[in-house]
Image (cartoon, coloured by chain):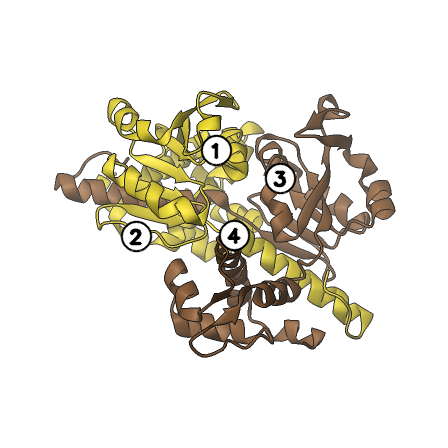
Chain colours: A yellow, B brown
Amino acid sequence: MEDASIQSVPYPTIKRYPAYLQVLKELKSTGITTVSARDIAERLGLNQVQVRKDLGYSAIIGRPKVGYDIEQLTSALHQLLGWQDPKEAFLIGAGALGSALLGYRGFQEYGLDIVAAFDLDPSKHNTAIHGKKVFPMERVPELAKRMGVLIAVLTVPESAAQECADLLIQAGIRGIWSFSPCKIEVPDNVVVQREELSAGLAVLSVRLSEMLKHENNGPSAPV
Amino acid sequence: MEDASIQSVPYPTIKRYPAYLQVLKELKSTGITTVSARDIAERLGLNQVQVRKDLGYSAIIGRPKVGYDIEQLTSALHQLLGWQDPKEAFLIGAGALGSALLGYRGFQEYGLDIVAAFDLDPSKHNTAIHGKKVFPMERVPELAKRMGVLIAVLTVPESAAQECADLLIQAGIRGIWSFSPCKIEVPDNVVVQREELSAGLAVLSVRLSEMLKHENNGPSAPV
């Protein structure tokens, strides 16, 4: 597979790859070695034409009536995502969400290995959260350089987000996965991806309220 | 405000409300009492026309040159989202992600109070994770009924997702916030909202790879 091919994969396809990988992993754990696009599509509630198209960006060809080799397809998707070897990352902001994410071992599956945490609050320095040491923010530049870390997971409040991002950028961080609910200004050579956990919950709350209200057949308090 | 108005708020708007609430909270914590749509838009990197339109679904009117009263607007958005009083929820699947979410106190801000955890694995029963007791799955019906819990956060592997969802539905759960990367079949009177943490990380990985590759001016390994 040509490495350059990664540039041609559209983002909506990229976003579906982790779910495909999860299906492949589950199947593999039960001893299954091949899977069809149709089976993947059914498990994820997607259109099989879409799945076939998405998998077409890999060099792996599905065999008629057999499907894709799970091992080969897993490896190809990992390569397209750059997840063959987990990349080390720093977590910035050891508050409630940051601590939760430090305890989540699943990120390694997603090619991300959070190796250290940093916080502005001195009372957190030199403590450890889920076995990860918390350093003062000032140590980011030195440790990022020494460890060659390019990715940071940002979980600070809005008020500290830009200040922390500026420090990360100065320290050579090039990719920021931000859970802070605000815009961050970065130069063109830094990538920011924003995650909004609460958005999905908001939609769930409202959809559930609407349904219950409709059942009660009249106005009532939202759930 | 008419309660029925909640039904007319589009989902993309609903998804932005939590970010608005976060901005309002941060401003309030610094002693500020009013905010303009323009200021909210700038902080979140949104279009101010969009913000003004979104806030228009509340009954709160911004005053020219002054803006919205933060207290009133917060309360109106909470009401539109049904977040005035946190609703109790169960967490299903006390694995890595489930444990992380149990430790995240921030959900209360989002109107969600996770009161207990449940797992299929007997070795986890009667333990406590971040102070929340882990019960056997079989106890969901009894406890859901007794506590009037209607919402579940689902963090089980794909292989267990449908089985757990079926049990939840039988137990009277009406809203499922699913972090399991698969489709779940539910009857029409149950709402499922799927969260895919890894999708954002996949896009970050690939965008960063593309940028670094471009800088190196030729094919190289993805980051």
> How far is mark 3 from mark 4, CA to CA?
33 Å
Tag 2: amino acid: Glu
| Location of residue B75 with respect to A22 vertically, above or below | below
Tags 1 and 2 on a common chain: yes
Q: Secondary structure at mark 3?
A: loop
Say whether marks 1 and 3 touch (CB < 8 Å). Answer: no
> How far is mark 1 from mark 2, CA to CA?
22 Å
Q: Could you say where residue B33 lies in the image, as x and y percent from the top left?
A: 52, 63
- Residue drawn at (24%, 26%) of the image: A145
> How far is mark 1 from mark 4, CA to CA?
20 Å
Tag 4: amino acid: Ser
Q: Which quadrant: the N terminus of chain A?
A: top left
Depth check, front residue: A75 or B168: B168
> How far is mark 1 from mark 3, CA to CA?
22 Å
- Residue drawn at (41%, 34%) of the image: A120
The quarter holding residue B72 reads bottom right
Tags 2 and 3 on a common chain: no
Q: Which residue is mark 2?
A: A185
| Location of residue B28 with respect to B92 vertically, above or below | below
Q: Secondary structure at mark 1?
A: loop
Q: Which quadrant: the C terminus of chain A?
A: bottom right
Q: Which residue is mark 3?
A: B155
Instruction: Chain letter for mark 1, please.
Output: A
Q: Residues within 10 Å of mark 2 (few under 14, many from 20)?
A: few
Instruction: Chain letter for mark 4, please.
Output: B
Residue A94's disc is 1
Residue B184 seen: no
Q: Secondary structure at mark 4?
A: helix
Tag 3: amino acid: Thr
Depth check, front residue: A118 or A220: A118
Q: Which residue is mark 4?
A: B29
